[in-house]
Image (tube, rainbow, N blue to C red):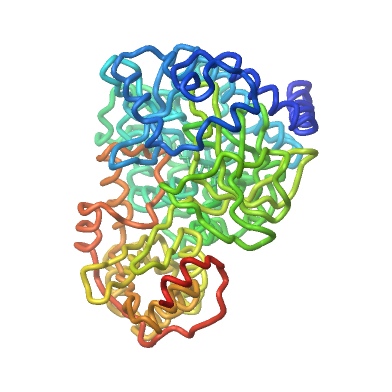
Amino acid sequence: MDGKNKEALKEIERLTARADEVQENILKEILTQNSATEYLIKYMKGSKNMLEFKQSVPVITYKAIRPYIQRIANGEDSSLITSHPITEMIMSSGTSEGKPKLMPSIEEDLDRNMFFVSLITPIMNQYVPGVDEGKHMYFFFVKKEISTPCGLPVRTASSRLLQSKHFKRQAQDPSNDNNTSPFQAILCSDISQSLYCQILAGLIHRHQVQRLGAAFASILLQVISVLERNWVRFCNDIRTGQLDLMITDLECRSCMSTLLSSPDPCLANEIENICSRASWKGILCQLWPRANFIEAVITGSMAQYIPALEYYSDEKLPLVSNIYASSECFFGVNLKPLCDPSDVAYTLLPNMGYFEFIPLGEDGTMLMNVGEEDDVPNDKLVDLVQVRLGCYYELVVTTFAGLYRYRVGDVLQVIGFHNCAPQFRYICRRNVILSLDGEKTNEEDLQKSINVAKKLLEPYNVLLGDYTSYADASTMPGHYVLYWEILFHGSSKADDQLANIAALDEKMLQECCIAVEEELDYIYRICRTHNKSVGPLEIRVVEPGTFEELMDFFIDQGASINQYKTPRCIKSEGALKLLNSHVKASFFSPRDPKAATPTIVDSTNVYNVIM
Ligand code: AMP
């Protein structure tokens, strides 16, 4: 291991061993630097005292900070919330009251985030020696930059990193060309052209690629889907040494023409042989035979893509989920990258921001979910080093750029410690996603239920590709609707897929409906069986490609492909219309779910529902 890698690992040890001291210093620094801001003066009257901070500064959601951010976006001084000039706004994938959330960012955030990212290779190197050798096929995307009314750039956190001088310098350094994607292709804001060129470049370098990845697992599945539809074109480009005319971006054409400088029929035949096989099981290992692992976030809502990635890698490539980060702040890294997907935990790095936690439940049981608008008493929060093993928390962050006691919206569970720094399992977004009559189904509940139901598909050689849900209150009583895109192994042609949907076994899908319901919580089942206030759950099977269209729909509305995660619940009318227009079959629960003992204790809710 080289000196740089060793130094990075030592730094992780130093930071985690003194997590409490590092956190205290971070808060002290933030308060010292920002005590004269309008926001902190309002609550702390110029004090820099940490106790005063904990007593007087409220725990907030985006709604409370938005007016300040809006004023800065319109041209008022950054000193409303931070002593540093706000140099740009980072666009989060989250929305608040129908508008994208903008997060303030200062120059030094870039250094902090670069430091964070620089830890990943040294961590990996401990488990996969020589990990930075060979080529990486990592799909990066940049979103078109927009600006606020006063001209501040608005970008996603990843676009910011990719467009930074540091990254550009690295990417243009000929001695440092270890990513297969040409820099110009990454920077092309036409996502389809960028993706086409990045895949083609990955295929050209197929024998050197040692690591495959993207920010999220969903992006890799999109790569496979584009590959499935375009492999003949890719082979043609390689065979002739000519880039497909569909790529019109000049920068893309110029960088790809260097890569395609001479026809390579031999490589084209190899790829054609692999892609024309009836089954694509293990295709990733066949196309990139030297790949050691797949890197992408596979926790939270991404967990549902694990079976598909395992299928396409024939379970031969470890899935590595390295990073837990957001637009507000980069949080933690996975120190055991080769662990089983179900054991992934992120160690929060105590120098990234000041972290506090809203307790949500004791050992292994999540007792409550604090709603978006619920007040959180200031003295309820615990510090990073005070969290306890097994307990659930909601993450709250304070940053140099002007977020104070800001509820990130993520629910985490402590599953271990590295030195003094806790390691968290990502559980879900705070928000309840489905609710018709007092029952509150969150993303994790839904995911767990779907995990059970989709097992019923396995004997039929089918996979759940993607899903979302909708609480349909237009029926009497209202009912949950799940949109399922089902993949049939071994058939990639759209016509075959449609024929397969038509032949789906009704009983099997009905059993999936009831399996989901029986896994949903006690209160849901009371609503269904006792109160009859929720009707039988429905699964609507949509045609292949629907979820890709859904993604395009959200990207057109301003979402970024780098951050895109299929929403697990649909609220937008346009998206719903799109989904409904692709429904090919629909199935309902054939009976009432069995009642069972409560798993989530929330006394007010049980009371409301039963009464
Ligand atoms: P954004 O601000 O749009 O980049 O989204 C950040 C959010 O994505 C976080 O607050 C999490 O909810 C989710 N997220 C980021 N990293 C992970 C991860 N490793 N596992 C699960 N969810 C994640």
Viewer-side residue, 368 vs 258: 368
Q: Position of residue 541 (x, y in %)?
A: 31, 69
Viewer-side residue, 13 vs 439: 439
Residue 505, compared with residue 380, is above or below; it is below
Q: Is residue 583 left or right of residue 11?
A: left
Residue 478, compared with residue 167, is above or below; it is below
Residue 479, compared with residue 301, is above or below; it is below
Residue 173 visible somewhere in the drawing: no
Total label count? 0
Q: Position of residue 134 (x, y in %)?
A: 63, 33
Q: Is residue 191 left or right of residue 137?
A: left
Viewer-side residue, 4 vs 38: 38
| Picture quadrant where residue 556 is located | top left
Q: Is residue 184 left or right of residue 206?
A: left
| Picture quadrant where residue 387 is located | top right
Q: Quadrant of the N terminus?
A: top right
Viewer-side residue, 131 vs 485: 485
Which residue is painted at 37% across and 86% down in the image?
Answer: 507
Q: Quadrant of the C terminus?
A: bottom left
Which residue is painted at 57% across and 43% down in the image?
Answer: 295
Residue 349 visible somewhere in the drawing: yes
Q: Position of residue 148 (x, y in %)?
A: 29, 21
Which residue is painted at 77% across and 23% down in the image?
Answer: 7
